Amino acid sequence: MPQRQKIVLVGQLTLFPWVFEAAERAGIDLVLVPRGDDTVENARRAKAVVEVLPLDIDGDPAAALAALVARYRQEPFDGIMAGNEKVVPFVAHAARTLGLTGISEDAAAVVRDKRSMRRLLRDAGLQTPGFVELDGPDRWTDALPLRFPVVVKPANGYSSLGVIRVDDKDRLEEAVGNTWKLVEANLRQAGEPAGEAGVLVEEYLDGPEVSAESLVHGGRVRVCAVSWKGELTGPYFEESTLRAPARLPAEVLAAIEAEVIGAHHAFGITEGTTHTELRLVGGIRPVLLEMGARIGGGGAMHYVTHASSGIDLAAEALRIHLGREPECWSREPEPAGHSAFYLVPVGPGGRFVRVRGLEEIEADPRVDYVVRSAAPGTLLRPYPDWTGYPALVLSHHESDAAAAEFRDHLARTLHVEYEEQS
Ligand code: ADP
Ligand code: CA
């Protein structure tokens, strides 16, 4: 028997089981670096975890890297993989330091900054809307020459926090001010200059949204699944649902693939897995919104991909980060069917009590996972702010129509209960 391989998984929330289950399926052992808001007890209990290695990556990245190197010297591990967006640069740095498979630190910095992504897409001749970078709230007038409507957003945000559509030039100053406040409160690292955290204003891309999950190994990209997110018109962009495979004409799918593959090359993303969001302008012309060098949705996009294309995305990602070729490079998996991902909307927000109707949904044979992602008593703030989702529902279906119908059923039957305001 060859020895089992061991990979360091950094900051993967244990509430989301997919990567842990994939490691178990693939016979890979995990050394888990718990996310700051997770507990060591949860980390110990997670599937495939043989060791827990707490590191203060946020607070002291240099000490965290030194501790990781010391751990490697004690007994080498075979790879390292990011379990969330924020740790992508740290993981790239660690991989280079230890000589393990990963993306370059430059590429990691690119995909953490929407300004860099926009510049590189433009320079590579790929589709991109007009955009303006602001390094202070007073600079909002720089964006007036853009074609309105525009979207104001943090340069390195997540979950549509602080993303605001603006239709009139008269409302731009106010929107930039609001987004800037949210950046200061949520996204700016201690000691970071204001310009680093920055705000981007870009032209509104009118059309439905899709997401593409890819694997990349030695610079070769495979788009494994394209999911349909549908029409999100704003002014705030709370994500609530997607389903795969997206029902689109072959030429639109081919155009999406070309744009996604081109973006990997432009950004220098050569190893691992990515989550790319695009808009289909006029329903046909794909334009990239952003790319993350990790599994999307905290791992949920593994499920969406696996349950539709048959590709075991998370296991393949782990293999790539162990320096191995993904199995789907040489063996074509059977397409599995249709999958759906539903995020229970926050709605008006407040002090969270529970999601009514979730027990019934959990018992439905089409439902494979229900994740209660907010603890009772948590204050959930409404968009354009963001603190968390109440719950996630992942399901499989026989057709796209059945998946869409189930989404409507969830929207009708699930209700978020908040404490009464006194
Ligand atoms: P985040 O990192 O917060 O997810 P995104 O750039 O993905 O930031 O923006 C969040 C959402 O806002 C997108 O999924 C999309 O629905 C909407 N959005 C962002 N930029 C644009 C744009 N230029 N045109 C249309 N919609 C946009
Ligand atoms: Ca996004």
Image (spheres, rainbow, N blue to C red):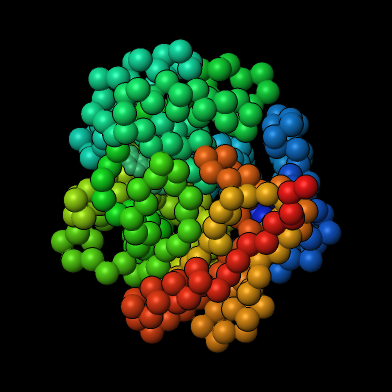
Task: Please give the name of the residue rendered at 58% of the width and 16% of the height, measured from the top-left corner.
Answer: 193
Q: Residue furthest top?
A: 138
Q: Image quadrant for the N terminus? A: bottom right
Q: Nearer the viewer, residue 347 or 370?
A: 347
- 235 to 231, vertically: above or below: above
Say whether residue 338 is visible.
no
Say whether residue 140 is visible.
yes
Q: Nearer the viewer, residue 249 or 30?
A: 249
Q: Residue furthest right?
A: 41
Q: Position of residue 401 (x, y in %)?
A: 33, 78
Quadrant of the picture in which ligand 1 is shown: top left
Q: Is residue 85 left or right of residue 218?
A: right
Q: Position of residue 352 (x, y in %)?
A: 71, 55
Tell me the quarter of the picture where residue 125 sits. Answer: top left
Q: Is residue 125 left or right of residue 165?
A: left
Q: Position of residue 370 (x, y in %)?
A: 62, 71
- 292 to 112, vertically: above or below: below
Q: Position of residue 16 (x, y in %)?
A: 64, 62
- 317 to 338, vertically: above or below: above
Q: Residue furthest left?
A: 251
